[in-house]
């Protein structure tokens, strides 16, 4: 296997990203191609991990002010208005199983934190399933400095998520 590289999204990546995304269920929701394309279009951060010449992971980060109706994005948008804080929201971060635990997750988050600094946001936000449990993701986000700022049930009560925030340090790069 060649060393993975991070690169910008290409429209030709869509089908591969759908497959990678859906393979990660239930950590992320099954997402049809048209819906994932719409999420990519809304995102201010779209970074793809490429391995062996093919997409093998990605991150999507979104700024405030979108018409996105995700329960978690709405929670964070309301919270940001109350606290008068800018943010970049990580809608999803997904890696092919063969690439996990190789340091790529922190690299993807570095791109998100760079965007947050660029736009003057004070936080990077995300959620992690606690029901069904995703302890690996929760531990990963804790190592990156995320703390729980709330919990909510989503998908009509089928899931419970921990809502996480990490401060953006404008003087350093992740």
Image (cartoon, rainbow, N blue to C red):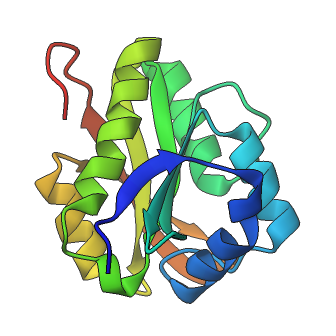
Q: Position of residue 69 (x, y in %)?
A: 76, 48
Q: Is residue 157 visible?
A: yes
Relative horizontal placement of residue 105, taking residue 145 as reference (left or right): right
Quarter holding the N terminus?
A: bottom left
Image point (42%, 20%), residue name: 83
Q: Position of residue 84 (x, y in %)?
A: 46, 14
Q: Is residue 140 above or below residue 76?
A: below
Q: Position of residue 8 (x, y in %)?
A: 55, 43
Image point (66%, 74%), residue name: 16
Q: For this rendering, which residue is in front, 53 or 16? A: 53
Which quadrant of the figure has residue 17?
A: bottom right
Relative horizontal placement of residue 104, taking residue 94 as reference (left or right): left
Quarter holding the C terminus?
A: top left
Image point (43%, 18%), residue name: 85
Q: Is residue 88 above or below residue 19?
A: above
Which quadrant of the figure has residue 172?
A: top left
């Amino acid at each position: 296997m060649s060393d993975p590289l991070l690169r910008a999204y290409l429209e030709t990546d869509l089908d591969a990203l759908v497959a990678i995304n859906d393979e990660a269920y239930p950590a992320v929701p099954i997402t049809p191609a048209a819906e994932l394309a719409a999420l990519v279009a809304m995102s201010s951060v779209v970074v793809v991990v490429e391995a062996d010449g093919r997409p093998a992971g990605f991150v999507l980060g979104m700024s405030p002010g979108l018409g996105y109706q995700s329960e978690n994005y709405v929670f964070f948008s309301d919270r940001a208005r109350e606290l008068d804080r800018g943010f970049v929201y990580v809608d999803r971060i997904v890696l092919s199983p063969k690439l996990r635990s190789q340091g790529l997750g922190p690299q993807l988050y570095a791109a998100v934190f760079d965007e947050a600094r660029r736009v003057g946001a004070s936080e990077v936000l995300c959620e992690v399933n606690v029901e069904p449990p995703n302890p690996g993701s929760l531990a990963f986000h804790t190592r990156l400095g995320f703390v729980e700022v709330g919990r909510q049930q989503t998908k009509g009560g089928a899931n419970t998520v921990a809502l996480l925030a990490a401060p953006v340090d404008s003087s350093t790069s992740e």
